[in-house]
Image: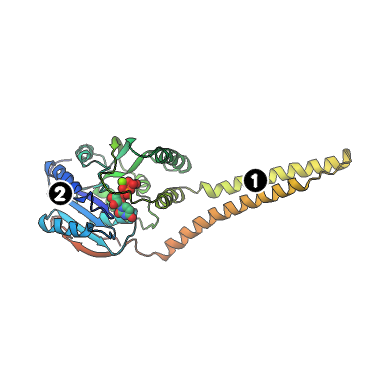
Amino acid sequence: MSLPFRLSVAVPLYNEEKVLPEFLRRTRSVIDSLAGGPHEMVLVDDGSADRTLAILEEAAAADPRLVVVALSRNFGHQAALTAALDHCSGDAVVLMDADLQDAPEAIPLFVEKFQQGYDVVYATRASRKEAWWLKLSYFLFYRLLAMLSELSLPVDAGDFALLSRRVVEQLRRLPEHHRYLRGLRSWVGFRQIGIPIERAERHAGKSKYSLRKLMELASDGIFAFSIVPLRAAILAGLLATALSVIFALYAVYARLFLNRSPQGFTALVVLITFLSGILLFFLGIIGEYVGRLYEEVKARPLYIVGKTVGWPNPHGEQGTRRAR
Ligand code: UDP
Ligand code: MG
């Protein structure tokens, strides 16, 4: 691929006033050092309650490379990322967090791979600086998901990635609501490659991912990319049936030949509670899929834009198309 090309950096922000000035400074200087251009930064304010939007608007007024998209309320990280993708006009898009955990200095490495012909270049976490229990959860989750999913999903790869224009266009066609972008990115295909990049500590402020949000993201990954949990019900059912048949045969045998009837109230109670537990568990799993069906059927938009600054980018070749 020949230069010059235009890069878009897509960033979701939620209450990031503390890191924002430093983030803009570091990212800008990386973009300045890139060949080609004019590059752009698409910054999506995900309904922040602090001065994030004010800082963004100020910065955008002084710098035509900034595109600001303010959502009407907090729609969550994955929706904000989707909004950012929908407003990018570059030949390639780098998705990154605003808290400087994704080092802007890695962008040239991504671009190098892109120019070698890759459509997706994603960062794999060589190491991360986080609490041990969080590290362990990430480790187990990525492996569980890779095991459950038919798609080969790379382990330890987050959203920090470069996507070519055609990948972005394919992603825009996907209407699903519970978005697990790092999975959808694999699903799209084309030439993909991971490069190990250290995940730094958050520069300032607190994580905007509560444990609940993290669990939701994890379940979006599993339920959107696997139906193995549904099939597990069949397996459990078969197993329970087989056990019960064996026990029934034994009961007949004991009655006829040993002149003994099996007895035991305790065993009965344990068995009933155990089986109702399994039944309710799988009812819950089915409910999870039904609930997701319901959300999709309603087909509400993924996000609502309250305001934009500097969009559409006049440098965008075919202008920016909005899929929704
Ligand atoms: N974020 C967002 N909306 C949210 C939560 C987070 O746009 O509802 C942004 C946040 O500002 C940051 C990125 O998503 O740029 C990742 O969030 P965070 O760093 O808090 O997550 P963590 O790295 O702790 O998983
Ligand atoms: Mg972070």
x 45%, y 48%: residue: 222
Label disc, if present, on residue 39 of the rendered structure: 2
Given the current orientation, which residue lies at the most extreme left position?
A: 62
Residue 182, given in percent of the width and then of the height, sits at 35, 46
x 77%, y 45%: residue: 248
Q: Quadrant of residue 145?
A: top left
Ligand 1 within 8 angstroms of badge 2 C-beta: no
Q: Residues within 10 Å of mark 1 (few under 14, many from 20)?
A: few
The reply, left or right, for residue 258 in relation to residue 225 is right
Residue 316, given in percent of the width and then of the height, sits at 16, 55
Residue 100, given in percent of the width and then of the height, sits at 25, 44
Amino acid beneath label 2 = His
For the C terminus, the image quarter is bottom left
In space, the residues marked 2 and 1 are separated at their CA atoms by 58 Å
Name the mark nearer the viewer: 2 or 1.
2
For the N terminus, the image quarter is top left
Can residue 7 be seen here? The reply is no
**Image height check: is 309 above or below 134?**
below
Amino acid beneath label 1 = Leu
Ligand 1 within 8 angstroms of badge 1 C-beta: no
Report the colour scheme: rainbow
* Disc 2 secondary structure class: loop
* Disc 1 secondary structure class: helix
Q: Quadrant of residue 76?
A: bottom left
Q: Residues within 10 Å of mark 2 (few under 14, many from 20)?
A: many
x 25%, y 51%: residue: 11
The reply, left or right, for residue 188 in relation to residue 11 is right
Residue 283, given in percent of the width and then of the height, sits at 58, 55
Q: Who is closer to the viewer here, 14 or 119?
A: 14
x 13%, y 43%: residue: 29
Residue annotated with mark 1: 238
